Amino acid sequence: MRKKAEQILRSRGAMYGPGAAGVQPKAAEEGGCGVTGFACTVPVRGRHIYEPSVQMHNRGNGKGGGIAAVGMVPEQLGVSREVLDTHYLIQIALLDPACHAEVENRFILSDFNVAHSVRVPRIADFHDIPGLEVQPPEVHRYFVRVKPNVLQAFIETNSLQDLSPRDAEDEFVYRNSYRLNEAFYASLGDKQAFVLSHGRDLLIFKLVGYAEQIVQYYQLEDFRAHVWIAHQRYPTKGRVWHPGGAHPFIGLNEALVHNGDFANYWSVAEYLQQRNIRQQFLTDTEVSVQLFDLWDRIYGYPLEYIIEAMAPTTELDFDRLPPEKQDIYRQVQATHIHGSPDGPWFFIIARSMPDLKRFQLLGITDTAMLRPQVFALSEGEVQVGLICSEKQAIDATLRSLAREDARICPVADRYWNARGGSSTDGGAFVFTIAEKDGKKILACADKFGRPVEIGGGRVRCDLPSSTGVPPVIQGQDAPATSVREALQKEDSLGLFRYGADHMRDWSPAELRGFCAAIRNGGNNGALKATAIEALTLLHDRRYDVGDKRRCSVLQLLDDTLKAVFDSTPRVGEPGTGRYRRIDLATRSRLAKPEQGAEVLLVNAEGFPPEGEECDAVLLCEAYCLGWRQFTVYGCRGQRFTGCGFGPASDGVRIDVYGSSGDYLASGIDGLTVVVHGNAQDQLAQIMKRGKLVVYGDFGQTFMYGAKGGEVYVLGNGAGRPLINAVGRPRVVINGTCLDFLAESFMAGDALNGGGFVILNGITFDDHGTMVPQALPYPGSNLFSLASGGAIYLRDPRRQMVEQQLNGGSYVPLTEADWQLIEPYLRENERLFGISVEELLTVDGVLREPAEVYRKVCAVKLKVLAAAAEEEGAEVTDAAAEEEGAVAESEEALPERAEALAAAVQPASHAVGSNA
Amino acid sequence: MSTAVQEARRGAIRKPPQVEVLRQVLPAPERYRNPIGRYKVVRSADCMSCGQCVKLCPHGVHEKPPGYRFTLRPHDHLCIGPDCAKTDHYCVDRCPRHALSLLRNPTADVLGDPRWSSDLILATWYEAETGHAPQGGLEYRQGESGGGFDRLRFRFPEQPPREVARPSGSRRDPADRATEIDTSLDLNRRNDGRPQVHIDIPVYGGGMSFGSVSIHAILAKARAAVAWNSFTCTGEGGYPDRLAPYDDHVITQVATGLFGVREETIQRVRMVEFKYAQGAKPGLGGHLLGDKNTPDVARMREAIAGNALFSPFPFHSVYSIEDHKKHIDWIKEINPRALVSTKVSTPADVDMVAVGSYHAGTHIVHLDGSYGGTGAAPDIAKKNIAMPIEYAIPKVHRFLVAEGLRDGIVVMASGGLRCAHDVLKAIALGADGAVIGTAEMVAMGCTRCGNCESGRGCPRGIATTDRELIQLMSVEWATQRLINMHNAWREQIVDALRRFGMKSIRELRGRTDCLSYLERRDERERAYA
């Protein structure tokens, strides 16, 4: 292996010619992007990458989009299976079609045997695609093998004797593309041509525009592949754009898209150049995939080590690794740390492994998890694995897939976030499609190869039964009767209990009958409220669903709810009851609530996610007109729900259904927002007062800078929740969070009006029963450098250790603490059905609160306290200017290292030693 | 959105009646008994109080109020110094008893530093007291740093190119001048349906948070902003209730600590500023020691008194350009009428940052260069990380021009802009206007002793939250000092534009041909053309 790597890298020197090497500055800044990808056990049409791309429009700026497809259908490419598997598929983009002959003669015909070539079809006039402003490149496709004599000469000239012929051929193709790019792209002011992709069974398109426009322009709507990835780019330099800068970038058999921005591009490029790898497109993404190609194809590292080299495991997580892994990881880090991308990044990689007959989709996050990322897995007859920047894009993909293939459920079985650089999952997940018994199967595993498996039932229940016979339900206990009675009595809780109790044993048909009965009742204005409440409880709560797939139960309930919502009279239409409905088409009819109308149902579908016309603005307008109760449904990632109501919005309530978007409930000051499902990033930023309930998970930077409010979360959270929160926020999180929970928490004294977080660290098993998670909180930097407030941890087994803190300390729970938190746990019980007694029960025994909960409180740190010696320490000759000492009174944050060092020594010790 | 709904939404934002402040130059003498001046005029015991010097001095150094037997101690901070000897009113030579002598004031010699030279501080005090630029000797146009703006000179033409000139003696008669040369700026160039915001001078006040400066200083800045139809900025310490009558002239700052930022404070203003970084310490956050977190400060920041408060770097919710766009969209959703300013420091790729901000929807990009900054910023950061503002401005300006975006965005510059000529130079380099901080502090009497971050003990009662020290300075007095200083600046701006034959400050933008750069060998050259 070592010989092979040396031979490849050394001989590359000759390829570059006499020109001086040297790192060139990055060509563009592009922090922002939207990335999405999915892998499916059946080849699916390109139109399905269209939806998530459109959904993430606002993560790009239309200056670059790209898609890649892996695992294609040979017939649609006009080749045999054998050719598709064995031949390199070279796609060349011609920015200047005039150079076609020259490119082809110099870089294809002379050295390759061409099995098939085609000019890729496209629509005649790009102006026909709305919003597309730049002519996309003309694309030529070739299926090639290197001519045997050429390959032989290549091996001899470059002394590549230790390479297998296939490896040598790979290297030839790689270098051929480099030379083509050098001749027609990198060296030129006016770019003429470049290689889009050259791997086997891998296809890439890029243009200046949005990713979905590729699907339209190159007519890929019906083009089928197992794995698709797409990228919306947001570059900020230059008026002249080339599709060459768009993602994905290629190694050999892999395509990589990237969201983020390196702080150490220079160092990474230097690292690569020391290994004779030079850059042509000068972006973070190019060097990222060069790293992957180096570690994978040339060094032959297993995927686990590649991920370790990219996102090193650190701190407590490193200590938690088994010793033998530590030995290897230490070597990996020592060797490659300078090539390790530093800063916020998230990669999605699609790769074909033709010799193994496998396809892979990978997502890798940086160690600090600074970019948003969501993974999802949908099991069933057709399996789908998905990775996106936003959950709502996953939902859009699944919806699109389900429309075409009923075997796919529009709701995934599981959604989760990766923990970067961790010992728990390694911050990376791999979806592998392999063949087993002539059938493609998809397996998901984390960095360490541990599988992600979905338990629970397998029976779908959201689809109409294939027989088409409506379910016949008889007997006293028949759902229809009970539903009618409960609705009449306006007993939504009873209806919910009835449903939850029977769910385990119901057949899909019976469940559908139950839902249909509620739907029929809910169409009636008077019974609608009870129907909605009961369906919502069934949707939100956890209970045993028996042999049914929970996601399909949710989908059925979603459909039923939507039907009930949709049967509501529109604003301005004649109707009775408390509910009125408004949607995009009728938004201009918004008016004061008429007599008796109390709840405004907003169908968010089609509303733009932000801007003057978004649904969040509509809610504010309706609020000003006198509406106080809102239900937003059909969300597709629309942002800012609940924002802009201003102060003293007490008494307002917003219920949100569907894929809610970023910044939900940010800044609320009095009102109540209830999210029926998972929430996304930047939830409840600067929240002041009011209440937020999330019946699911939340994303990054939850409650950043919050001042107060009550928040209840059923599920888990991503990284950096409650950073910089002050005042008196009171939060119950029943799941757990990724790292940096409540960093710099400044919420006073919890027992004296300040804020706190209760972290229960529980989850639910396949039967809806509460179970503790493996660790109440897996990460480190819990309550890091916090100066106030408290964390109450449910940790009956005392699994949490000192190293997970950074400046705080564990103290026993006192009676006063319990009196403080119990009412919040009671409310938590009311909302989620998680009983306090159950929380206090460990191993079947009801325990004292102090045995189950631990408190983390702030230690008066020298760096944080009003230490006298700090005064004047920072005064310098050039005193204040601008917003300086005069303007902003913040002291400089001491060097991090100093802070950490000081954090180890509590101030009390310092005082002691002084005395 | 229908008009009715718009009106309803606007009406929902409760705003108290807005206060008016007259734009009127009135004397605002130093509030201490013995003001510091460049010179000392000493009256010996030989004086017979004949009153000759009182009659002679046009600058008001000598005063003998009616009914007084003796002449008062000389107001020597108004003295123009030895240059006066060339005039016919030089008191020292004309005193019949030779009782007067003129010396350099040793206190003045220890004042200041190369950036904010003794002369600049004294000149700013003079401007704040009188409303006009000092005459005779005090260098009010530049400091002595030997770098930055102190290396730049205007190349004024011999004669104003157009017939706009008036005798220079009319400098103290600005009223009719104001109609003639336009110093105003429009801050919304996006044509996005949001209201236009117009400021009468190309300058507004930078963020100074409650907690760092006294409420009197904050109110005075706001009142002066009203008088000059400009802005002041809250900084990140929250929005004091007493600012409410000036809402229309307040910028709410949203900084990384998000202290005191609430929907209400975003909704009540016409402009919101994101502070991503400070030029003095880019990449570093802030940290307010527990000691400074007094009950008043804590209430404003919604924190608990006595605890240290952190401002992180960067925004935890913004790690990339599309996050920034989302951030701006959020503020725009909360306040549908506000303009958005993005304050950034000046890294090497500041030009790309500016273009990215434009595409993200900002109205103003505010570049904060490295000369600014705090006594508290670590030395290693100060002047070592960010790009000097005089490099950053043309870099950004030219890149925006090349991108065809220059007229869609306003570029404001800050970071060590000390005087009217610094503002002019920043504009000639390519900015639209300037944001100032320290100059306003100096106008209120700051001596730049540099102890402001050390707690509540500002000896001049400006950068303090101590209830007694605050009383050292009244709001009315401080307001007048600021109004006066801005008047002096505007006169200088108008004068410079006249000499270039320009009718509007907007004509000066990007006119680097109006500037020359002093090479090292010219460093001693101090005189203006």
Image (tube, grey):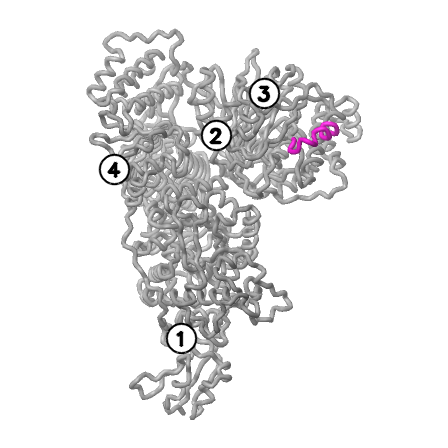
Chain label for disc 4:
A
Kind of residue at disc 1:
Pro
Tell me which residue sits at (71%, 42%) in the image.
A21
Q: Residues within 10 Å of mark 3 (few under 14, many from 20)?
A: many
Q: Which residue is mark 1?
A: B35
Image spot of residue B329 (x, y percent): 42, 41
Kind of residue at disc 4:
Gly
Relative to B59, residue A202 above or below = above
Relative to B404, residue A135 above or below = above
Kind of residue at disc 2:
Val
Q: Which residue is mark 3?
A: A71
* Foreground: disc 1 or disc 2: 2
Q: Residue furthest front?
A: B163
Image disc number at residue A54: 2
Q: Determine whether label 4 and label 1 are within 8 Å by CB.
A: no
Mark with earlier residue (4, 3): 3
Cα distance in 3D space between marks 4 and 3: 55 Å
Cα distance in 3D space between marks 1 and 3: 83 Å
Image spot of residue A614 (x, y percent): 38, 35
Mark with earlier residue (4, 2): 2
* Foreground: disc 4 or disc 1: 4
Range shown magenta? A94-106
Kind of residue at disc 3:
Gly
Secondary structure at badge 4 equals loop
Q: Is residue A474 left or right of residue A371?
A: left
Chain label for disc 1:
B
Cα distance in 3D space between marks 2 and 3: 23 Å
